[in-house]
Amino acid sequence: AQKVTQAQTEISVVEKEDVTLDCVYETRDTTYYLFWYKQPPSGELVFLIRRNSFDEQNEISGRYSWNFQKSTSSFNFTITASQVVDSAVYFCALIVGNQFYFGTGTSLTVIP
Amino acid sequence: GAVVSQHPSRVICKSGTSVKIECRSLDFQATTMFWYRQFPKQSLMLMATSNEGSKATYEQGVEKDKFLINHASLTLSTLTVTSAHPEDSSFYICSAHGLAASYEQYFGPGTRLTVT
């Protein structure tokens, strides 16, 4: 069975602090994809990144970075120098076949 | 990326009435569409999977007679909430999957349903 765990339900940080959102996944399939989405108060899911199971290379995009470690089945997301606009709910998700499995989300509040 | 639209974005209806939500893939053909439901401060829960021209497959616990799904064309799927009740108030999100790789799914902006 597939499962995604985001143990952090809510996180608050002060603006300009760095913050890491944790994601642990479970699957027995060798081919899968991992995603991070941002969901602002409007509700629309904003795609952030996709990684396939064969590509463990970490990625940096501006203030965002992702650390994919198959050995620990983790796909953590770090925001550097957080800003108020980063406040949102962040979902980690796993695709196996064509089905999405979402984590429970982490609500991030960046305090000015 | 591809665009998926949903209409309406918000709807308020009275208890007992039916509401139809449309999900359209605007620039690609969606062989499969998925419907999710999201309660406040919770994750997305898959309700059903619909393939064009065939009956939808519902997840366990989802009443198919209450949530009617029609995927009549490669660009349109509809979700009808029949005899809506206040507990059906939720955020409904669709996603569309085309003919490309399995990860090529695109989410609609969601529809917020409030049943009074």
Image (cartoon, grey):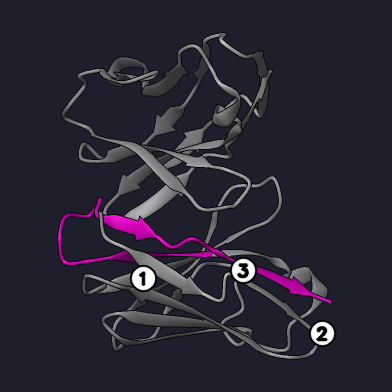
Instruction: Indicate whether residue B98 is drawn in magenta.
Output: yes
- Residue drawn 24% across the image and 54% down it: B104
Q: Quadrant of the C terminus of chain B?
A: bottom right
Please give left or right for residue B100 compared with residue A45 in the image. left
**Element marked by disc 2:** loop
Label of residue B61 in the image: 3
Please give left or right for residue A59 compared with residue B35 in the image. left
Give the letter of the chain under mark 2: B
Can you identify the residue that label 2 sits on?
B15
In this rendering, the answer to whether A106 lies above or below A64 is below
- In the picture, residue B60 is in which quadrant? bottom right
Label of residue B33 in the image: 1
Crowding at mark 1 (Cα within 10 Å: few <14, some 14-19, many 20+): many
Which of discs 3 and 1 lies nearer the camera? The answer is 1
Percent position of residue B38, x then y: 62, 57
Task: Give the distance between the C-alpha atoms of the residues marked 3 and 2, in whole angstroms.
Answer: 21 Å
- In the picture, residue B4 is in which quadrant? bottom left
The residue closer to the viewer here, B111 or A35, is B111
In this rendering, the answer to whether A57 lies above or below B30 is above
The residue type indicated by label 3 comes to: Gly
The residue type indicated by label 1 comes to: Met
In this rendering, the answer to whether B103 lies above or below B19 is above
The magenta segment? B93-116
The residue type indicated by label 2 comes to: Ser
Mark toward the start of the polypeptide (3 vs 2): 2
